[in-house]
Image: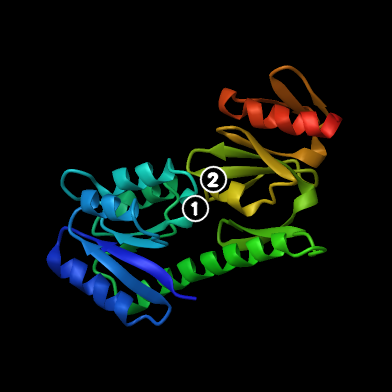
């Protein structure tokens, strides 16, 4: 599998370096390079782009602004971003727009390759997940791994009650623990990670376990002692699920 990539940077030397790194990486294919985010957006709207290596501070439209535009698009998970910037203070901002990784300039080819490999693994997992869905009788996903502080923690799906957005993190509330797990990721990433037949986003700040719903009222869901509001933008999908469940 080769990932179709573009590079976006208003600094010619930085742009050329990223393009060179892409071209010497066997699993990446460079299909475009741009000195402006506006030019890149026009290209993305007309072509399949899986991975963007992009600077943040650019004139007219910044890399962060372009990332927010892409985040609002349908099937936005099909295009992922690796930021490459000289400003470390943008790292947390990168998590907010679900950037796959963050390269601090100047970076080596080894740093670049680590970020590219993370992207490759993401798309490989995505491909395998889609393949599993298509296979009849495929073994369902039973657990996930979450980065908690400095370790990866195995979490059984049946143990998850709900997931809550918390600043730049998520809180994963479990049956087996009184305190939630705090993981540096986004709710959108969790939504992509969790199987859609078992979990549903019902609010911009909450994903719930469908198996652990105790009761449903007009505008909220009750899981144990917790009452979680159903957001207006998610109500139609949730009511559709409830209608199918009750029929």
Q: Residue at x 77, y 30 (%)?
A: 242
In this rendering, would 134 be left or right of 58? right
Please indicate, yes or no, whether residue 26 appears anywhere in the rendered image: yes
Q: How is the image coloured?
A: rainbow
Residue 238 locus on image (x, y percent): 69, 30
Residue 160 locus on image (x, y percent): 74, 46
Quarter-wise, where is residue 81 in the image?
Answer: bottom left
Q: Answer whether labels 2 and 1 touch (C-beta < 8 Å).
A: yes
Q: Nearer the viewer, mark 2 or mark 1?
A: 1
Secondary structure at badge 1 equals helix
Secondary structure at badge 2 equals helix
In this rendering, would 84 be left or right of 94? left
Residue 74 locus on image (x, y percent): 48, 44
Compared to residue 185, the image places residue 206 above or below, namely above
In the depicted view, which residue is nearer to us: 107 or 176?
107
- The residue identified by callout 2 is 188
Residue 25 locus on image (x, y percent): 37, 80
Gap between marks 2 and 1, in whole Å? 9 Å
- The residue identified by callout 1 is 77
Q: Residues within 10 Å of mark 2 (few under 14, many from 20)?
A: some
């Amino acid at each position: 599998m080769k990932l179709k990539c573009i590079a976006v940077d208003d600094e010619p030397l930085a742009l050329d370096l990223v393009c060179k790194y892409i071209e010497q990486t066997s699993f990446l294919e460079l299909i475009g390079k741009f000195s402006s985010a506006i030019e890149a957006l026009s290209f993305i709207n007309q072509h399949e782009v899986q991975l963007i290596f992009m600077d943040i501070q650019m004139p007219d439209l910044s890399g962060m602004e372009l990332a927010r535009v892409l985040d609002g698009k349908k099937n936005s998970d099909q295009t992922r971003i690796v930021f490459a910037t000289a400003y470390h203070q943008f790292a947390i901002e990168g998590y907010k727009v679900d950037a796959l990784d963050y390269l601090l300039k100047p970076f080596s080819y080894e740093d670049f390759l680590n970020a590219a490999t993370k992207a490759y693994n993401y798309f490989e997992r995505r491909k395998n997940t889609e393949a599993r869905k298509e296979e009849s009788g495929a073994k369902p996903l039973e657990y996930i791994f979450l980065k908690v502080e400095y370790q990866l923690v195995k979490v059984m799906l049946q143990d998850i009650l709900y997931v809550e957005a918390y600043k730049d993190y998520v809180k994963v509330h479990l049956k087996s623990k009184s305190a939630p797990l705090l993981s540096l990721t986004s709710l959108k990433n969790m939504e992509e990670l969790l199987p859609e037949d078992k979990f549903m986003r019902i609010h911009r700040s909450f994903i719930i376990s469908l198996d652990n719903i105790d009761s449903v009222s007009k505008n909220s869901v009750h899981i144990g002692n917790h009452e979680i509001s159903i957001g207006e933008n998610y109500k139609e999908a949730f009511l559709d699920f409830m209608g199918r469940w009750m029929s």
